[in-house]
Amino acid sequence: MALTVGPAGVAASVLVTGIAELVTNDPTIGDESSLGILHKAALVIDSDGMLAWLGSAAAAPAADVRVDVAGRAVIPGFVDSHTHLVFAGDRANEFVARMAGTPYDGGGIATTVAATAAASETTLRNLLARRIVELQSQGTTTVEIKSGYGLDIAGEERALHLAREFTPESTFLGAHVVPAGVARDDYIRLVTGAMLGACAPVARWIDVFCEPASPHAFDGDEAREVLTAGAAVGLGLRVHGNQLAYGPGVRLAVELGAASVDHCTWLDSADIDALSGGTTVATLLPGVEWSTRSVFPNARRMIDAGITVALATDYNPGTCASSSMPFMIALAVREMGMTPAQALWAATAGGSAALRRDDIGVLSPGRRADLAVIDAPSYVHLAYRPGVPLVSAFQSSPGQAGF
Ligand code: NIG
Ligand code: FE
């Protein structure tokens, strides 16, 4: 289905009708579940790409253009709150080795740093643009993008400038690993000093790979130094924590009020208690467990403890080369104990919470009309029919009011 609304460049309001199942994530409407589901629904998108109205199809107001989605489901667009999209090259060989039993320890990041350094800015921009199209075509309407394959001032700055061309959700991850040949202390001084100074103006967030079990990543004290320096210049905090082993990352993230701690594969009861008493979202990245042959985190345990859980892809050349949020939903349901409803919520409203956004992830009047149309009568088919390209359309932003 392809529709450009109005003559080129002319905005118009759009009535979307024929919605068999509309997931709003607004628990005050529809079936009053956490997904706020309406059946036989319609919605109106105004000429600025904002939701003007939603409700029963029988009560729909008029609009300039009418689109009939013919019995499909409509959901909020996916919010992929964790990606590393600015890179060149691939690490398919590393994947093959892992499938044969070689464990992941972060050492392959250096391969991508070298490939990225060798790529021109134009090449990187083109690669990034193609990846954005790839994820949008699977229903993602908001994406966070990290640096972290530069590891010097110019490389990190370049990655963030490129990320900013595509999203406001840009994250400085100079503290991804310590580059080869650089002393740890010197590198931490650089990341918290001159590199931070150059990168902060083009970043909304700062992140750190806190993983004492990896010889390449950062321990709790080092991570604290990085995050504290970022906070001091006004960046919001995110943490890669507890991916490879139990460790301090999750508790540090909660203590410092990070918006999200991501991976959360290895959590002990102190981590669960910290998360359930704090404001930090636990973002789960099941594509990583799949691609690294790891055990999966127990999402059910986290949700039962009252923790807000998000799902994201972690799209990167090392630990998850998939851009597909529907695949993450299918994995979450099959491997992490989430219901289809919990997984959909985590991939939409959960991602929005992980980015501290209140304009996306929920469909209600006044919010952005970022949505995805599922070529099925219910969102449940996302998990029920894994690997099938069911996202038939999306609405992404003002001026781009096309399906
Ligand atoms: O989120 N854990 C650290 N960073 C990425 C992997 C990066 C890579 O291996 O290239 C992750 O899994
Ligand atoms: Fe990551």
Image (cartoon, rainbow, N blue to C red):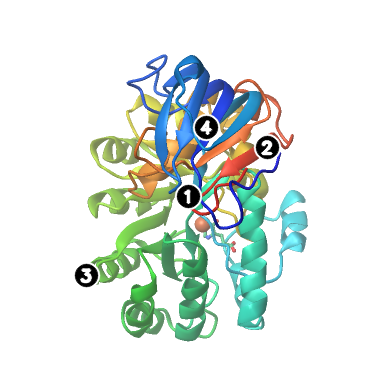
Dot 4 falls on a residue whose secondary structure is: strand
> Residues at badges 3 and 2 in contact (C-beta under 8 Å)?
no
Mark 3 C-beta closer than 8 Å to ligand 2: no
Sequence-first disc among 4 and 1: 4
| Residue drawn at (59%, 46%) of the image | 5
User: Which of the two discs, 4 and 1, sits closer to the camera?
Assistant: 4
Residue 175 appears left or right of 97: left
Residue matched to label 1:
245
Corner quadrant of residue 118: bottom right
Nearer to us: label 4 or label 3: 4
The image position of residue 157, as x and y in percent, is 46, 79
Q: Residue 232 has which mark?
A: 3
Q: Nearer the viewer, mark 1 or mark 3?
A: 3
The Cα atoms of the two marked residues, 2 and 4, are separated by 17 Å
Q: Mark 3, residues whose alpha carbon is within 10 Å: few (<14), some, or many (≥20)?
A: few
Give SS at disc 2: strand
